[in-house]
């Protein structure tokens, strides 16, 4: 990603509903250049789907928890697909340490979280879980500062 790509991402972040022509004019580039670069960024996975901007609380899932999961060391890899199939699992990371996976989970309330946790334990090859409930989001996912840093990069001479 170069500085122009980063500037394009900042412009889209500032006004996601802006027409391509307006964004291109604001950036001082051709509309085709904007379109081609956005397509390339999407294909490369740099621009993620719109649904990442939707707050699960708006859908009734106001409780956030982090669930550490220990898997069977010989066959645990099979569990990841089953765990990813839960709609309440909104992120999943392989980790080092005591657990093999860290899941970010949303639930309607603690009773719903209890149900979900029980279903995780029923997944073959899940050995144990440990759940921590988030009391409040202190800092939401952010990437803007990184994009701004990339936009300010000067090419090496």
Image: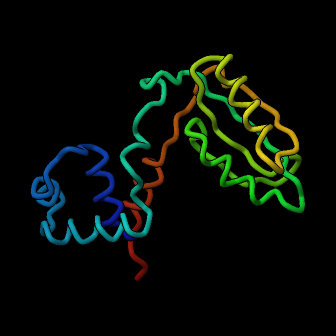
Quadrant housing the N terminus: bottom left
Q: How many marks?
A: 0
Position of 149 with respect to 99 (left or right) is left
Residue shown at 35%/61% (left/top)? Answer: 6
Q: Say which of 14 and 3 sits in front.
A: 14
Point out residue 116 in the picture as x, y percentages from the top left corner: 68, 30
Point out residue 139 in the picture as x, y percentages from the top left corner: 55, 32
Position of 129 with respect to 111 (left or right) is right
Residue shown at 16%/55% (left/top)? Answer: 23
9 above or below 107?
below
Q: Quadrant of residue 108?
A: top right
Quadrant housing the C terminus: bottom left
Position of 78 with respect to 151 (left or right) is right
Residue shown at 12%/69% (left/top)? Answer: 30
Point out residue 11 in the picture as x, y percentages from the top left corner: 26, 51
34 above or below 138?
below
Q: Quadrant of residue 73?
A: bottom right
Position of 1 with respect to 31 (left or right) is right
Q: Quadrant of residue 150?
A: bottom left
Point out residue 9 in the picture as x, y percentages from the top left corner: 33, 56
Q: Say which of 109 and 147 sits in front.
A: 109
126 above or below 26?
above
Residue shown at 86%/50% (left/top)? Answer: 97
């Amino acid at each position: 990603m170069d500085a122009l790509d980063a500037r394009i991402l900042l412009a889209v972040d500032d006004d996601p509903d802006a027409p391509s022509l307006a964004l291109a004019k604001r950036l001082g580039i051709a509309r085709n250049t904007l379109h081609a670069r956005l397509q390339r960024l999407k294909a490369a996975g740099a621009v993620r789907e719109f649904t990442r901007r939707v707050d699960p609380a708006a859908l009734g899932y106001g409780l956030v928890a982090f669930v550490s999961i220990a898997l069977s060391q010989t066959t645990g890899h099979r569990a990841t697909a089953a765990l990813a199939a839960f709609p309440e699992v909104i992120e999943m990371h392989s980790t080092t340490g005591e657990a093999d996976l860290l899941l970010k989970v949303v639930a309607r309330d603690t009773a719903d979280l209890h149900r979900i946790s029980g279903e995780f334990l029923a997944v073959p090859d899940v050995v144990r879980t440990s759940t921590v409930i988030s009391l409040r989001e202190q800092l939401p996912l952010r990437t803007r500062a990184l994009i701004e840093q990339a936009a300010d990069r000067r090419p090496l001479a």
